[in-house]
Structure formats: structure tokens, C-alpha cells
């Protein structure tokens, strides 16, 4: 019996050692993955390029730079340098879909980073992290559904009015629950935008009415929002949008390789959390571009299988019908 007991004890000891080694290896791999997501991938900025044949026949090609979710914090030199260099893409138009700030002292660094792009015609709408600074939350809460905006007592206002003023002084058009037309070469772009749907601030203003013959002139209808909630995409589509642009999702931020996003932080299906897709509603199909964004909340500075991005959309004439 002593011999049997001795053998059993040796087997248990080896099993425990194996389990301990496996657990240690798992923890090491998890730590390495987290380190990569926090220190490496979140700064691997890239430009996604898309081509869309949606302009009126005969119109000149239009290069649209879509920026979203910059979440600027003072001291983010690599992000600032990369943003500064985007002017080298030579866009004709900049569309900013919000969440530019993540710190009360970020307006100055943001404007410095965007300085060359502020010389380009642009439009913008705000996100919740333009109004309110992020707060520390349990990251697992996101898997229970869309994030809850900060309660009144948690809110720390950001200097969004200073940012709005600077954007406006540079000539960028504020589309916060507003619409406006802008002439580009031999065509007109009719813009409409809403305040952040994630905060339930969206109040749809429709498109500019124009003259009685404005629909006959070459034009494009572009709709802009921060958070791509389905109700917003539906009323944009029903009202004749030709292109819809949004951000907010961070592309899922932490994704599963070969699967994609686990969440979109709104009611948008996760497979639409990043990229160019077609949105169908009431018999119409409209291109929807959702940016994975450039930054993250400063309290969750990680990205995995979801690199930060700006999007360069090359709009070309559609074929005559």
C-alpha cells in the first residue's frame, strides 16, 4: 500500500506541475497580448482607401478624408505627427465624425495636429467625448450592451466650445442637427448631420431645400453622424442620402482574428462595425462608411486585431443610366 500511495503521489505532483506550467504559459501569453495591444497596435496608424462611383456623371473625382474618434490627450506625439502628415494625401474635403477629445487640455494639441487639414474644406459633428471627458468604468460592462453616457454627477465638461470655434474659424461647417450645401467645382454637395445619437441628441434637420430646380443640378447628398444607430441610418436613407459617414464603434477595438468585432457599442450589427457596407431601408441601398477611429479612451488604451485608421474615400462619377 505504501508503494501504491507513493506512485499516486508522484502522478499527482506531475499533474499539478503540468497544470501550473500551462497556467503560467497562459498568463504569459495573455500579458504579452495585452502588452502588444496597449503599447504597439494602438499606434499602428493606417489609411484605409475606398473608391465609390456615386458622383453625378461628368463630375470631377473627389477625395474625402474621413476622420473619427481621435480622442486626443496631451503628449501623444506619434498620433499628432501622423495626423499632421495626412495632409500629404491631398484631400479635397475633410469629414470629422466626432470624439476628438479625451482630456480638458487636448484642444491645443488637437488643433496643432490638424493644422494643415484645417486649410482644407471640412464638415464636422460632435461625439460624446467632445462634450464630456471619459470616466473609469469596468471594461466588461461593454459586453452587456452599449456604453451608458456618464451620469450628471460624473460629467466633467470638455472645452468643446473652444474646439467648435476653432473649427468654424478655419471654415469647417458645423453639422450639429443642421444642414448646408457646399459647392465643389461643377457640382453641389448637400450635407446633413446630427448631434450624437449615443446621447440621444440627434434632431434630424433634413437636407437644404434650395431652389425649385435644385434637384435638377448635379449634386450629392452626404449624411454625417457620430454613432451609427439604426434609427439614424434609416432616416438618412429614407430622405435620399447618397453616402453616410460615422464612427463611434472603434471597429470593436478588441477583435477576434478572422472573426472581427465582438461589439459595436450601439445597435449596429457587429459585422458592420468597421468598413464600407451597404445600408438597405425602404427599397433604397446607401453606402455606409464606419471608421474604426484613430484613438481610444485614455482609460482603455488598447487595440487588438483592429488598427487605428483614417479613411480616404475617392468618389468618382457613376455610369450614366
Image: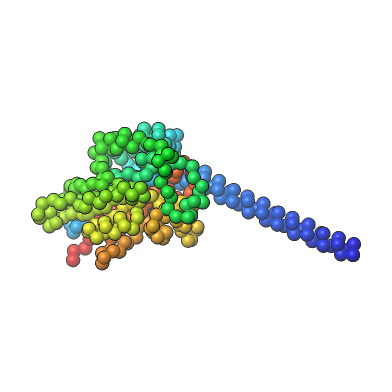
Q: Viewed as shown, does residue 41 lie left or right of 152?
A: right
Q: Is residue 226 visible from the viewing direction of this image?
A: no
Estimate the x, y position of residue 29 in percent, counting from the top left: 60, 52
Q: Which image quadrant for residue 270? A: bottom left
Q: Viewed as shown, does residue 231 lie left or right of 102?
A: left
Q: Residue at x 25, y 51 (%)?
A: 204
Estimate the x, y position of residue 72 in percent, counting from the top left: 40, 39
Q: How many numbered markers are drawn? A: 0
Q: Residue at x 38, y 42 (%)?
A: 129
Estimate the x, y position of residue 146 in percent, counting from the top left: 42, 53
Q: Nearer the viewer, residue 143 or 31?
A: 143
Q: Viewed as shown, does residue 201 lie left or right of 45?
A: left
Q: Residue furthest left?
A: 212
**Quarter placement of the C terminus:** bottom left
Question: Is the image coloured rainbow, by chain, by secondary structure, or in one colour?
Answer: rainbow
**Quarter placement of the N terminus:** bottom right
Q: Is residue 237 visible from the viewing direction of this image?
A: yes
Q: Viewed as shown, does residue 130 lie left or right of 255?
A: left
Q: Residue furthest front?
A: 153
Q: Residue at x 42, y 39 (%)?
A: 153
Q: Residue at x 59, y 48 (%)?
A: 31
Amino acid at each position: 500500500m505504501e508503494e501504491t500511495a507513493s506512485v499516486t503521489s508522484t502522478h499527482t505532483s506531475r499533474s499539478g506541475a503540468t497544470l501550473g506550467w500551462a497556467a503560467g504559459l497562459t498568463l504569459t501569453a495573455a500579458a504579452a497580448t495585452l502588452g502588444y495591444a496597449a503599447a504597439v497596435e494602438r499606434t499602428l496608424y493606417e489609411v484605409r482607401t475606398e473608391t465609390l462611383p456615386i458622383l453625378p456623371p461628368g463630375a470631377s473625382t473627389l477625395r474625402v478624408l474621413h476622420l473619427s474618434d481621435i480622442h486626443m490627450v496631451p503628449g501623444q506625439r506619434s498620433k499628432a505627427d501622423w495626423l499632421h502628415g495626412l495632409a500629404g494625401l491631398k484631400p479635397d474635403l475633410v469629414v470629422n465624425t466626432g470624439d476628438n477629445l479625451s482630456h480638458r487640455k487636448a484642444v491645443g494639441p488637437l488643433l496643432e495636429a490638424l493644422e494643415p487639414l484645417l486649410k482644407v474644406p471640412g464638415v464636422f459633428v460632435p461625439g460624446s467625448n467632445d462634450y464630456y471627458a471619459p470616466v473609469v468604468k469596468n471594461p466588461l460592462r461593454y459586453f452587456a450592451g452599449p456604453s451608458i453616457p456618464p451620469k450628471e454627477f460624473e460629467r466633467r465638461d470638455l472645452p468643446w466650445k473652444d474646439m467648435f470655434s476653432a473649427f468654424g474659424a478655419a471654415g469647417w461647417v458645423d453639422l450639429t442637427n443642421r444642414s448646408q450645401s457646399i459647392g465643389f467645382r461643377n457640382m453641389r454637395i448637400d450635407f446633413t448631420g446630427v448631434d450624437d445619437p449615443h446621447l440621444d441628441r440627434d434632431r434630424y434637420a433634413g437636407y437644404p431645400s434650395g431652389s425649385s430646380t435644385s434637384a435638377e443640378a448635379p449634386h450629392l447628398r452626404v449624411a454625417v453622424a457620430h454613432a451609427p444607430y439604426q434609427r439614424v441610418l434609416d432616416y438618412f436613407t429614407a430622405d435620399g442620402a447618397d453616402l453616410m459617414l460615422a464612427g463611434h464603434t472603434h471597429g470593436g477595438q478588441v477583435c477576434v482574428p478572422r472573426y472581427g468585432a465582438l461589439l459595436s457599442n450601439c445597435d449596429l450589427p457587429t459585422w458592420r462595425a468597421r468598413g464600407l457596407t451597404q445600408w438597405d431601408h425602404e427599397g433604397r441601398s446607401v453606402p455606409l462608411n464606419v471608421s474604426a477611429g484613430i484613438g481610444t479612451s485614455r482609460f482603455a488604451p488598447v487595440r487588438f486585431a483592429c488598427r487605428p485608421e483614417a479613411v480616404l474615400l475617392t468618389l468618382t462619377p457613376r455610369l450614366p443610366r
